[in-house]
Amino acid sequence: MANSPQAKKRARQNERRYTINKARRSRIRTYLRKVEEAIASGNQDAAASALRDAQPELMRGVTKGVLHKNTVARKLSRLNARVKALG
């Protein structure tokens, strides 16, 4: 349990950041799921547009510190390869 004022403030900040980051991660996963569903349907146009929508959301996750930049680069690269393979 936090005792000092500094530790109490830190605990409050961590709690606030946790909820914000949780929402961000959830939003990113939703975009990724839409891309996965479009790929599964076999429609390349839908998959490409879903990937275009997901890309800025993933990059925002990097700038906000929710995801590592290499993780996002890897995910985008693999998704892009799968979308191209549909054609």
Image (cartoon, rainbow, N blue to C red):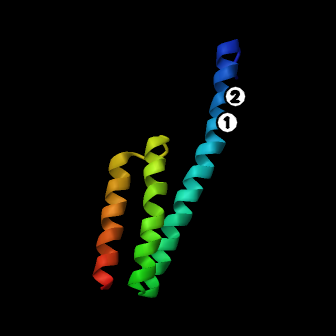
For the C terminus, which image quadrant? bottom left
Q: Position of residue 82 (x, y in %)?
A: 32, 75
Total count of labels: 2
Number of residues whose C-alpha sits closer than 10 Å to that of mark 2, classed few (under 14), some (14–19) or many (20 or more):
few
* Residue lying at 62% horizontally and 37% vertically, measured from the top left: 17
* Residue at the image point whose x is 35% and y is 62% from the top: 76
Percent across and percent down for residue 36 are: 46, 74
Q: Quadrant of the N terminus?
A: top right
Along the line of sight, the residue nearer the viewer: 14 or 62: 62
Q: Secondary structure at mark 1?
A: helix
Q: Residues within 10 Å of mark 1 (few under 14, many from 20)?
A: few
Q: Amino acid at mark 2?
A: Arg
Task: Give coordinates of residue 9: x percent, y percent.
Answer: 68, 21
**Quarter-wise, where is residue 18 in the image?**
top right
Type of residue at label 1?
A: Arg
- What residue is at 36 percent from the left and 61 percent from the top? 75
Mark 2 → mark 1, Cα distance in angstroms:
6 Å
Q: Residue furthest top?
A: 4
Examine the rendered structure and indicate whether residue 36 appears above or below residue 22: below
Q: Measured from the top left, where is residue 48 in percent x and y?
A: 40, 75
**Above-or-below relation of 5 to 55:** above
Quick check: marks 2 and 1 in contact, CB under 8 Å?
Answer: yes
What residue is disc 1 on? 16
Please give the residue where the numbered disc 2 appears in the rendered image. Answer: 12
Q: Secondary structure at mark 2?
A: helix
Question: Residue at image x 42%, y 69%?
Answer: 51
